[in-house]
Image (spheres, grey):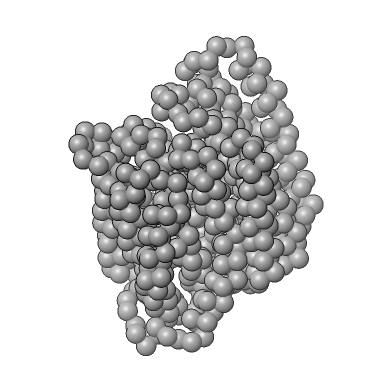
Amino acid sequence: MASKTTIFLNTMGTYFRSLVSLFLGIFTARWVLMGLGKVDFGLFAVVGTVVTFITFINSVMSQSASRHLAYAIGKGEDVRQWFNASLSVHTIVPLLLVAVGYPIGTYVVAHGLTIPAERIDACQWVFRLSLLTAFFSMASVPFGALYIAKQRIAEQSMYGVASTCINCVLAYVMLSWNGDRLVFYSVYLTSVSLGMLAIYVVRSWCIFPESHLDFSAWWDRAKVKALFSFAGWNALGAFGWLVKNQGLVILANKFYGPAVNAAMGVAQQVSGQVNSLSNALMGSLTPEIVSTEGAGDRARMLRLSMSANRFASLLLFVFAFPLCLEMEYVLTLWLKHPPEWSVLFCQLTLLGMFFNNLTTGHAIAMGANGKIAAYQITMGGMMVLSLPVAYVGCRCGLAPWIVLVVSAVTMGALSLGRVFWARRLVEMPVRAWLGGLVLRFAALTLIEALLLVPLRFAMNESFMRLCVTSVLSGVLTIACAMAFVLSPQERGFVADKVRTRLKIRL
């Protein structure tokens, strides 16, 4: 199992990647929106959902591979056999998905979406290139899972930084491109993704002996069965996520058109960048939680899972709260003319993400335990239900905000469901979650609202108000975290790491 120092370094590496992505993403998204225009920007987002529907099993198998590799390390099993069994699965399954999904996706893009007739050919190329990228991403999943299981997450993060930098440069180049910019955008995204995947795989082969091919282990029935068994039940929850997220995008396209998809695309950009900061911690803690469960240390696993809830929520809150207060100004400053509904969509999306982060540790703990059948059935069903509810709202003539309201409410219900199932499956205490997390964040939110909302009305909208709001929110969040949000052990860990970093710099 990894030491606290390894977890800290991995978190800092991932956090650095997230900060770079956030900073460069500000320019990249603006240039992409300027280069493509609102219609093509929305079309790119909705075509991407078709690929996601076809390849959603990839995320399921990825979680299964990461879980079993980390669990094998915790139990001291032969990791090479698990890697090769996983590689065999991730070679065959993507081929089948692409063979079946290509003709279906081509038909949906041509006849199933609201796309201007003159842009159908360009959207078909977007679909083909996106599917090509998805295929190689799926095939390389075991290599990424090995990075995570081996706790080489800081190095993994550097590949993400390089990819972000290249994408930013190419987004700027697109502004002066005279051809079809939607196709150009898809080509350069595909090229960068495939190039980075190639480096990723070669480097993994060089540093991990477990990644060397062993065809005798490719069809180890017991291991392949275990991978598919975990993935099969996990697929129920993943399908629910797919329906809730991508289904709502397509629903919005059918009722409100590509312009609303552009606003949803902006919300996804904002939420993705902000959430990547909290995911920095999850990438480091997840393999440690799974390995700890594999080693049989349930008490430590539960402590780490509760810490994951607190830190993930804090890392999201420190950026999301001031951003929600100043969203209109930020989007105008960022995009000049953001699509209609962007402000409310971004705020509702961040709210749903916060609900999710309150119980992200619960989800990791149950995944580490492996007994997820009933849990995934419940969660998947709950998320699938969001689509007919939103459909009724759209049919009744409600404004586009109904789609994001349903999404946020669903995330709140999902978190409550996780608390219930974590209590039953891994004996994670409900009272500790309510008193040690929910009530403390309610107090934090109230304190910041009482101090920052009046400030918003006292000052005119300006860059100065944005800076003052952001700095005060950050100071208040850190102060409250150290005063009452974090546990005594977590406060001690943070203080110790800060002192260590300061000594090194001095």
Q: Residue 276's x, y, as percent? A: 48, 45
Q: In this view, does 312 lie to the left or right of 409?
A: left
Q: Is residue 227 visible?
A: yes
Please say whether residue 405 is visible from this viewpoint: no
Residue drawn at the location 56% of the way across and 73% of the way down: 232
Residue at left 63%, top 22%?
452
State the quadrant of the C terminus. Answer: top left
Coordinates of residue 132 in the picture (x, y in percent) = 32, 61
- Please indicate whether residue 453 sits to the left or right of residue 102 in the image: right
Residue located 65% across and 21% down the image: 453
Name the residue nearer the viewer: 274 or 391: 391
- In this rendering, the answer to whether 266 lies above or below 196 is above
Give residue 454's position: percent from left, percent from top: 66, 17
**Residue at x 31% of width, y 56% of height:** 129
Residue at the outermost right position = 431
Q: Nearer the viewer, residue 19 or 372?
A: 372
**Count of residue discs:** 0
Left or right, 259 with reference to 251: left
Residue 58 against residue 43 in the figure, above or below? below
Against 326, is 71 above or below? below
Q: Where is residue 81 in the image (x, y as percent from the top left)?
A: 42, 81
Between residue 25 and residue 114, name the one nearer to us.
Answer: 114
Q: Which of 452 and 403 is in front in this view?
A: 403
